[in-house]
Image (spheres, rainbow, N blue to C red):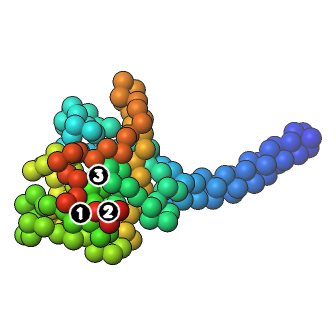
Amino acid sequence: MAQSQGWLRRYFKALCKGFFVAVPVAVTFLDRVACVARVEGSSMQPSLNPGGSQSSDVVLLNHWKVRNFEVQRGDIVSLVSPKNPEQKIIKRVIALEGDIIRTIGHKNRLVKVPRGHIWVEGDHHGHSFDSNSFGPVSLGLLHAHATHILWPPERWQRLESVLPPERFPIHSRDE
């Protein structure tokens, strides 16, 4: 009897040690390296949620890739909504700091993206709450880079950083 209690005690002790190591490691990984998120809405159609409200894509969000605020035109990124800090939104980077962009429905026809900011838009113009509504977005609101579609299985794929030809900046900082 005493021997079985000793085994149970050792087992419980090992389980607790494992738990107290695994939980902080998992939380750190999910906060700093990568996590998964379900994409809701139609603003990124056809790239994400092509089936509309019937399906929601689940994407891999890479936090590590944006830790130094290094994004490229065409990247699909997750960011804190400038209008509602409780909400995260997913959009495509259209322009970087210093770029001049022709807007779609913004109060100014042309906008020069200020230093430390990016211009983001949804792929489904007219159905997206994006920089055309709220202007350039601070890089500090950047949350993660969406790299892959994980669900549904028939849509498993890497998300390419492609900028639609009609959305290239009029003048880019690289010129």
- Measured as percent of width and height from the top left, residue 58 is found at 37, 40
Q: Residues within 10 Å of mark 3 (few under 14, many from 20)?
A: many
Q: Earlier in the sequence, mark 2 or mark 3?
A: 3
Disc 1 + disc 3, Cβ < 8 Å? no
Q: In front: mark 1 or mark 3?
A: 1
Q: Residues within 10 Å of mark 2 (few under 14, many from 20)?
A: few
Location of mark 1 (residue): 171
Look at label 3 and name its amino acid.
Arg
Q: Residues within 10 Å of mark 1 (few under 14, many from 20)?
A: some
Disc 1 + disc 2, Cβ < 8 Å? yes
- Measured as percent of width and height from the top left, residue 115 is found at 33, 75
Location of mark 3 (residue): 92
Which quadrant of the view contains residue 106?
bottom left
Instruction: Find numbered disc 1 in the image and state the secondary structure of the residue it sits on.
Output: loop
Q: Which part of the image, by quadrant, shows the N terminus?
A: top right
Residue extending farthest to the right is 3
- Measured as percent of width and height from the top left, residue 128 is found at 16, 53
Instruction: Find numbered disc 2 in the image and state the secondary structure of the residue it sits on.
Output: loop
Look at label 2 and name its amino acid.
Glu
